[in-house]
Image (cartoon, helix red, strand yellow):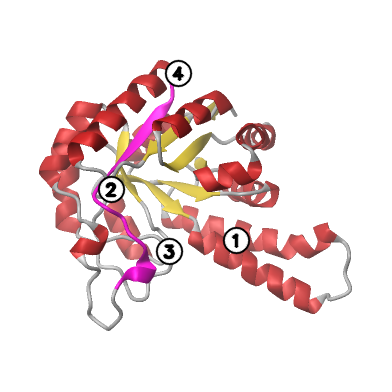
Amino acid sequence: MPIVTTNELLIKAREGNYAVAAFNTNNLEYTQAIVQAASELHAPVIVAATEYELHYMGGYAFVAMVKAIARDVKIPIAIHLDHGPSYEEVIRCLRYGMTSVMYDGSLLPLEQNIANTRKIVEAAHACGVTVEGEIGVIGQAADAHEGEGAAIDADLVGLADPDECVQFVQETKVDSFAAAIGNAHGLYKRKPELHFELLDEIYGRTNTPLVLHGGTGIPTEDVQKAITKGVAKINFSTVMRKGVIEALRASLDANPNELNYMKLLAPATQRMVDIAKEHIIMCMSEGKA
């Protein structure tokens, strides 16, 4: 199956009332597990990497690895830059051959975020590449206050403003965007409180596929409710990292004298397959390839 853009996947997701799961990777086993899980469920999938992960793997090596693994499966796969920090990094990713890029200018003043995103959209669209933007500040769950019934600070996550979302989409021509609605990256200390009325308004006024970051730990019912309100892509990273580290630690503890690296990694890789399948099903995208 050919490598595709996220735009192709997200348009179909909105039409079919499901979301496409995006999983971050940083090595061969991660990538194999993501593709295996999606292939077994016959689901579209997005394989993503941040700037840090790309520098670890090498950008050209990352793209070549995904393309090589994709040759043996019959599902559509997009190759995505997650939270691109600059115009220069996005241009590097276009050279690598990635089919989707995210520029995150959410910490900048709105006008600067718009100006930078518009410039990136012009360059990426000229190469046939999809662009994701971000409005509002999606913070770290670890920074949230603890306590039953406490809500994530609006100042911490910087909830998206619907008027700004409309302006952002109209002036940048972005293909999709992440809007802060109470979600956060990392492990939540308590149940996240998503602002569904805000999500309703943002999608209703922009009619643009929305992206939910910080998918780890959001209850299934909330994920699926968000999908009915315009979310077409959901990012998962922390849950995979936590799972693989726990499985690898158990494997090492159980086999202290084992020198076969591949044998030690096998349980951890299978754990990632299981986690990816669980979250693809959560997104209701199984059978949608």
**Residue linked to disc 1:** 274
Locate residue 226, reporting x and y percent: 28, 54
Cα–Cα gap, marks 2 and 1: 35 Å
What residue sits 54% from the left and 24% below the top? 95
Residue 103 seen in this snapshot? yes
**Residue linked to disc 3:** 186
Locate residue 119, reporting x and y percent: 32, 24
Q: Which residues are magenta?
A: 128-144
**Mark 3 neighbour density, 10 Å: few (under 14) some (14–19) many (20 or more):** many
Q: In the figure, 223 relative to 191: above or below?
A: above
What residue sits 48% from the left and 53% below the top? 280
Secondary structure of residue under mark 1: helix
Cα–Cα gap, marks 3 and 2: 18 Å
Q: Nearer the viewer, mark 2 or mark 1?
A: 2
Cα–Cα gap, marks 2 and 4: 27 Å
Q: In the figure, 196 relative to 81: above or below?
A: below
**Mark 2 neighbour density, 10 Å: few (under 14) some (14–19) many (20 or more):** some
Secondary structure of residue under mark 4: loop
**Residue linked to disc 2:** 107
Q: Quadrant of residue 112?
A: top left
**Residue linked to disc 4:** 127
